[in-house]
Image: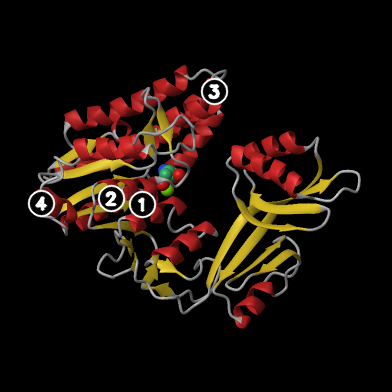
Amino acid sequence: MDVNSSIKQASMKVFKFGGASIKSPESIRNMASIIRQYTGEQLVVVVSAMGKTTNHLESLFALVKNKKEGQEKFREIASYHLEISGQLIREKENRDEVNSILGQLENSFQKADPNENPDKMYDQIISYGELISSTIIGCYLSETGMAVRWADARKFIRTDPAYREAKINWPVTCKLIQDQLGPEISSRLVLTQGFIGSTENENTTTLGREGSDFTAAIIANCLNAESVTIWKDVPGILNADPKRFPDPKLYDHLSFQEAAEMTYYGASVIHPKTIKPLANKNIPLFVKSFERPDLPGTRIDQGGPHPVYPTFVVKDSQCLVSFLAKDLAFINENSLSIIFHVLDMLNIKINMMQNSAVSLTICVDNNSRKVIKMIDALKNDFSIRFNEDLRLITVKNYSPASIIQVMKDKKILVEQRTRNTFQIVFDPGSGKPS
Ligand code: ASP
Ligand code: MG
C-alpha cells in the first residue's frame, strides 16, 4: 500500500445505524441529515434491518411449514417497507428495485423446503431484513443527490457455514473488503448491510442476532478506519438501563477492556464481538445518539479511565441448569470436561457458574433450541435440574451501596462475588417488587 492510500484510509469513518434509527420515513430522513453533516469525508455506512423487522422475519421463518399463513406474514412485512419507501422514493426505477427485493424474499419463503437444514434456511430468509433496508435507504440517499455505492456484504464478508452464528474468515474477508470497498470510498459513500455474509459457495449466512455492530468493526479493521460510530437511541453508554434503573449515568470515556467486559455480561448497547477488531487496530468507537448528534456520546479507546460508577447489567430469560453426578459420585474434572465439551459444541455461553462437591450449576440464556440439545446430550451422564424465567444481575465495579440496592426484596437463587464483580440470579416473579 502506498503512503497516499494509507493516509486516505486513515481518514475514513464507519457509521452503523441500527433498527431503531431507520424505523420510519422520519428516522431515515434524520439519518440522511446526520450523514450530510459529514459531507466531504469518506464514509462507509452499515445498516441493520428497519425497526423490528428481524423479529418479524423470524416469525415468517417459523411459518415455513404453513405457507398460507406465512404469506399473510410476508404481506405484513412487505407493506411496512412499502409504506416507508412510498414516502421516501419517487423514481420508478428505484421503486422497481424495492419491489424486486421484496419479491425475492417472497420467492425465497415460498420455495423454502421445510425438510432442509433449518439453520441454513433461517439465514436465507432472515438476511432479507438488511437487504431490503439497505435497498430502500440506498435509493433514497441517491434521490437526495448523494453519490452512493450500494455494496452487497455477501460479496465480502466471508464466513464458514455455521448458519445463524457464522464465523468470519478474516484473511479472505479483509482482502475482499480492501479490493471491493477500498477503491470506492474516496469517490462516494459506501452503503452496506450489517449482520450478513456468505460462505465460499455463496450461501447467505448471518453473524448472530444484533451482529451489525460487528460488521462495522470488521470493515473498520480491514480498511484501517479512523473511527467507528454506532448511532443509537440512547445518549451513549450508560451505567444502567434507563428503563430499569432511575437516574443512569453516562460514561463519556471508557477503555476497550471495560466496554468488552460490559458486553460480556450482557450490556446490550454494543454487540460483544465489536470491541476486539477495533482494539486490535486501536480504532476508537463512538456510541452516539441519533436524536442528538451534536452531543459527544461515549468514546471507547485504549486510554479510557477506570469507571467511577458501578455498572448494572440485567439479563432476562435466564435458566439455571444444575448437573448432578449420578449415584452419589462427585463432580470431578472429567465430568466438567464432558459438560464443557457439549457447551462448546453447541456454542452455549455461560453467564455465571458455580460448583459444589456433587453438582455444577450454570446460568445460560434460555435459548430453547440449544438448551434442549444440551439436555439431550448430557442426560445419560448426569441428573439435570432446570429452572427458567430467571433474571441475572451483574454489578461491575460494585460498591457496598450498589449491592444493597440490587439485593433488596429478592429471593436469590445464586449469588457470587469476585473482587470486581457481583452477580445474582433470582426469580423476578417472586419476592416483593422493588
Ligand atoms: N437486524 C439484526 C438483528 O436484529 C442485526 C442487527 O440489528 O444488528 O438481530
Ligand atoms: Mg437491531
Viewer-closest of 305 and 54: 305
Sequence-first tag of 3 and 4: 4
Judge from the rendering whether residue 311 lies leftward or rightward of residue 186; answer left or right.
right
Work out how far the residue at label 2 is from the one at label 4, CA to CA, in angstroms. Answer: 18 Å
Residue corresponding to mark 2: 220
* Image quadrant assignment for residue 83: top left
Marks 2 and 4: CB-CB under 8 Å? no
Q: Residues within 10 Å of mark 1 (few under 14, many from 20)?
A: some
Residue type at numbered disc 1: Pro
Residue drawn at (45%, 31%), measured in percent from left and top? Answer: 123
Q: Earlier in the sequence, mark 2 or mark 1?
A: 2
Structural distance between the alpha carbons of marks 4 and 1? 23 Å
Distance between mark 2 and mark 3 Cα atoms? 33 Å
Q: Residues within 10 Å of mark 2 (few under 14, many from 20)?
A: many
Q: Report the Cα–Cα distance between label 1 and label 3.
A: 31 Å
Left or right of residue 287, residue 43 in this image: left
Q: Which residue is under mark 1?
A: 277
Residue for badge 4? 3
Q: Amino acid at mark 4?
A: Val
Determine if residue 244 is in view.
yes
Q: Are marks 2 and 1 in contact (CB under 8 Å)?
A: yes
Quadrant hosting residue 428: bottom right
Disc nearer the start of the sequence (2/3): 3
Image position of 396 with respect to 165: above or below:
below
Q: Can you tell which of label 1 and label 3 is closer to the viewer?
A: 1
Mark 3 vs mark 4, foreground winner is 4
Q: The N terminus lies in which quarter of the figure?
A: top left
Judged by depth in the image, the label closer to the viewer, 4 or 1, is 4
Q: Residue furthest front?
A: 333
Q: Which residue is under mark 3?
A: 117
Helix, strand or loop for disc 2 = helix
Q: Quadrant of the C terminus?
A: bottom right
